[in-house]
Amino acid sequence: MSAVFLSTGELVFLIRSRSGMAFHHCVIEEAVANRLGLLYFNVTAAEANLPRLVMGDDIPVIKEYCVLLPELRVTGLPSLGEACGWAILNNKWEMYHEDKVFKCPQLVNELL
């Protein structure tokens, strides 16, 4: 899934429609796994906040363009509705870390 980090530090999904652009905020919770150098987080869409329509000068500055990758299972992608961790990578292929910054991933040898 694609998302953006705003200059405010918030992770949001960008929703475009005929009436304008809206942001749906996400909550990044604790890290749940570290597999082959990728750190996976619990990420949930903030249910309390409906997508906020933004127009004109109200549009916040986009700091990072990101992609969220699901934590793979032995059988491949998780089933629909199955809880899984999400790795967050920016457009420079840097990984989001627990200290809330993007850094290059470090390959960890988990096979030994």
Image (cartoon, rainbow, N blue to C red):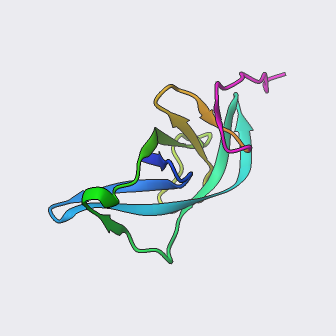
**Prevailing SS of the magenta stretch:** loop
> In the rendered picture of this protein, how many numbered marks are placed on residues?
0
Residue that protrudes farthest toward the front in the picture: 57
Q: Is residue 39 visible?
A: yes
Give the percent coordinates (x, y) of residue 29: 67, 58
Span shown in magenta: 99-112
Give the percent coordinates (x, y) of residue 24: 42, 63
Residue that protrudes farthest toward the bottom in the picture: 48
62 lies left or right of 59: right
Give the percent coordinates (x, y) of residue 95: 61, 33
Residue that protrudes farthest toward the left in the picture: 18
Q: Residue at x 46, y 30 (%)?
A: 91
Q: Looking at the image, which is closer to me, 56 or 24?
A: 56
Q: Residue at x 24, y 58 (%)?
A: 56
In magenta stretch: residue 109: yes
In magenta stretch: residue 48: no
Give the percent coordinates (x, y) of residue 100: 67, 44
Q: Residue at x 73, y 50 (%)?
A: 32
Q: Residue at x 44, y 46 (%)?
A: 4
16 lies left or right of 88: left
Compared to residue 110, the image places residue 33 above or below, namely: below
Residue 14 appears in which quarter of the rendering?
A: bottom left
Q: Looking at the image, which is closer to me, 94 or 85?
A: 94
6 lies left or right of 54: right
Q: Work out which quarter of the rendered image holds the C terminus and state it.
A: top right
Q: Is residue 1 visible?
A: no
Q: Looking at the image, which is closer to me, 68 or 79?
A: 68
